[in-house]
Image (cartoon, helix red, strand yellow):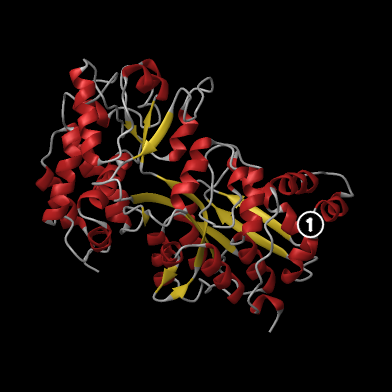
């Protein structure tokens, strides 16, 4: 058995300064780049992967430039210390083309899968193509990720994929300076959030702004709303049953949750600050829908940590800055459900160099290398990540919540559902819910009717 078949010992994570120096050296085009890398860090931590000189590993993903440049930069320590070459291919047609490539017998060595549901379908449809994780990958997964994250990469008891990047969706964006000026406090329970919304109305303003327009994907931000609220009104166990269709999509507990979403999004006194009435939610671009917060035309906007990329560059995103986000509260201060998402690494070959690269991508060394070359909007669920490397206060907060055991994490539900539902009727019916005031019961019943029979 080669070195990749043995459980790897935990290597010491590279310090913030060390990672920055490492990637800087690795990014050099000088002929001495490999030697500079060896001088910057101890390549002994890469010896577990073996001598891979002359070996090539192909990576296929939906991540395209400019983000792809950061991905490629994060591979340099592995390449320069092992001698392997990583061939990266990003495609906007990734989800459609990956099954085509598998059918044609032309799989990549590594792929980044954006949804657990997609991973499950690949394993079911191409059981001989997807490779179970090797022992070193399994060891990293169990050491550096929570059981929930490991389970999302597992199909029928076998680990196939490990987490790559992550995001947290349970946030409400606001203006700290505006809150201070108005005397508002960040709510810590759902009731306090609703009381704050009403207080803003009583003070003569419209509290919430929202938008779900996203081209062919219009409706997806509304599904995040429902998922977050199901976690808060029904709990994580019911959420799991709903996502796995162990209870119907229109179960009474889900009807209750959608009604709670409607208490905000269908209340004409509460929405849609700076954009219009309730129906304007369906036509307001999701990535521009919070513009009213710094303008003072709305106060609250529920969106993930990655919404920060849409703020004007002149705004400071910080706890005491122009805009920031607070945790979307649960029923009580001790009730802490957390909704999020991310990508997963899976392999289609058991060649030593492929398994070695998969192990690297599941390690703290890769997470720290990636963080050191990335601006705002990226972090990992890897517990070995040095959070001081994260470039944005909201990313640091996201990582803090994601790795805090007092929070109960659940992966985005629509990403786990069959595509016809999660990226189909769930989107379109939620759009009809706000655009034409379709009733809660009719929306959920239509989605239930669309669930595939097998």
Dot 1: element: helix
**Rendered residue at 39%/72% (across/down):** 124
Say left or right for 60 vs 72: left
Q: Quadrant of the C terminus?
A: bottom left
Residue 146 seen in render: yes
Instruction: Please count the marks in the image.
Output: 1
442 relative to 134, above or below:
above
Q: Which residue is mark 1?
A: 80
- Toward the viewer: 105 or 453? 453
Rendering quarter of residue 171 = top left
Say left or right for 249 vs 73: left
Residue 403 percent across, percent down from the top left: 47, 54
Rendering quarter of residue 451 = bottom left
Q: Residues within 10 Å of mark 1 (few under 14, many from 20)?
A: many
Q: Quadrant of the N terminus?
A: bottom right
**Rendered residue at 41%/20% (across/down):** 177
298 relative to 82, above or below:
above
- Toward the viewer: 209 or 446? 209
Residue 71 seen in render: no
- Toward the viewer: 422 or 41? 41
């Amino acid at each position: 058995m080669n070195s990749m078949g043995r459980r790897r010992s935990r290597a010491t994570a590279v310090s913030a300064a060390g990672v920055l120096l490492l990637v800087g050296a690795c990014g050099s085009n000088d002929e001495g780049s490999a030697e500079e890398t060896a001088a910057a860090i101890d390549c002994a931590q890469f010896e577990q992967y073996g001598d891979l000189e002359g070996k090539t590993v192909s990576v296929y993903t939906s991540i395209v430039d400019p983000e792809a440049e950061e991905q490629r930069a994060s591979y340099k320590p592995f390449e320069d210390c092992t001698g392997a070459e990583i061939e990266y291919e990003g495609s906007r047609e990734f989800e459609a083309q990956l099954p085509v490539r598998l059918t044609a017998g032309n799989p990549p060595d590594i792929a980044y899968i954006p949804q657990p549901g997609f991973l499950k379908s690949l394993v079911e449809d191409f059981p001989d193509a997807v490779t179970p994780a090797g022992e070193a990958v399994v060891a990293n997964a169990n050491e550096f990720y929570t059981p929930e994250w490991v389970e999302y990469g597992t199909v029928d008891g076998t680990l196939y994929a490990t987490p790559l990047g992550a995001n947290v969706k349970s946030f409400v964006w606001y203006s700290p300076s505006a809150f201070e000026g108005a005397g508002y406090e960040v709510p810590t329970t759902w009731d306090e959030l609703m009381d704050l919304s009403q207080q803003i109305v009583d003070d003569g303003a419209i509290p919430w702004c929202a938008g779900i327009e996203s081209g062919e994907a219009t409706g997806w931000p509304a599904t995040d709303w429902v998922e977050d609220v199901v976690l808060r009104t029904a709990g994580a166990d019911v959420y799991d049953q709903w996502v796995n269709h162990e209870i119907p999509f229109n179960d009474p507990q889900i009807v209750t949750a959608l009604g709670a979403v409607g208490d905000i999004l269908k209340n004409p006194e509460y929405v849609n600050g700076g954009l219009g009435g309730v129906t304007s939610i369906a036509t307001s671009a999701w990535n521009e829908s919070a513009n009213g917060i710094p303008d003072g035309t709305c106060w609250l906007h529920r969106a993930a940590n990655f919404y920060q990329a849409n703020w004007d560059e002149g705004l400071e995103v910080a706890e005491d800055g122009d805009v920031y986000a607070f945790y979307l509260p649960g029923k009580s201060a001790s009730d802490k459900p957390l909704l999020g998402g991310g990508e997963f690494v899976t392999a289609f070959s058991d060649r030593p160099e492929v398994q070695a690269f998969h192990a690297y991508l599941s390690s703290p060394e890769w997470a720290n290398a990636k963080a050191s070359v990335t601006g705002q909007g990226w972090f990992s669920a890897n517990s070995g990540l040095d959070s001081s490397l994260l470039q944005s206060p909201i990313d640091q907060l996201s990582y803090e919540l994601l790795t805090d055991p007092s929070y109960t994490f659940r992966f985005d539900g629509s990403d786990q559902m069959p595509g016809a539902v999660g990226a189909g009727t769930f989107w379109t019916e939620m759009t009809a819910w706000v655009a034409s005031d379709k009733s809660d019961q009719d929306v959920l019943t239509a989605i239930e009717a669309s669930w595939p029979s097998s």
